[in-house]
Image: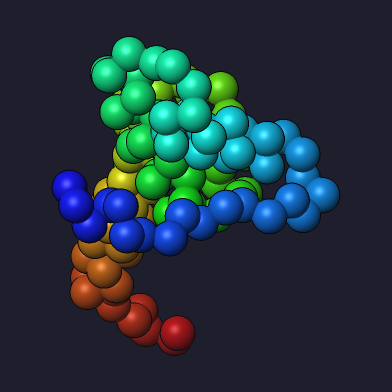
Amino acid sequence: MASENFVQANITHFNGHYDHWSMLMENFLRSKELAKLDSLRLKDLKAKNYIFQAIDRSILETILCKDTSKQIWDSMKKKYQGTAKAKRVKLQALCGEFETLCMQGGE
């Protein structure tokens, strides 16, 4: 992609959280082909670099043990998509209870 050559890279500034910063910087440098890697590993590092830029540090800390972009994606999908589905199901159940709720005499 020719447009990739013109995009200014976002370099993560160190803010005191070394583990977070070092993981981002290592992946960033490798994804910019500053280390010799095979093409599949390089593509994965580039994908991880984009994912890392798109998520907050507090969320990133929960996926530190994931090695590939697929593992990161699947972990986030399981954690956050599952949560949304659970909330939707709970909301539907509560709406159903509310609709069938009747006042008893003396209430």
Residue 5, percent across and down? 30, 52
Q: Is residue 90 above or below residue 100?
A: above
Q: In the rendered view, does 62 fall on the left or right side of 82?
A: right
Q: In the rendered view, does 13 fall on the left or right side of 39?
A: right
Q: Nearer the viewer, residue 24 or 62?
A: 24
Residue 72: in sight, yes or no?
no
Residue 36, percent across and down? 44, 16
Residue drawn at x 35%, y 24% as measured from the top left: 42
| Residue that lies at the very extreme toward the left in this rendered image | 1
> Would you identify the image quadrant in which residue 105 lies?
bottom left
Residue drawn at x 53%, y 35% as measured from the top left: 29
Q: In the rendered view, does 63 fall on the left or right side of 48?
A: right
Q: Is residue 49 above or below residue 107?
A: above
Residue 36: in sight, yes or no?
yes
Q: Nearer the viewer, residue 103 or 6?
A: 6
Residue drawn at x 34%, y 81% as measured from the top left: 103
Residue 64, percent across and down? 58, 29
Q: Nearer the viewer, residue 90 or 71?
A: 71
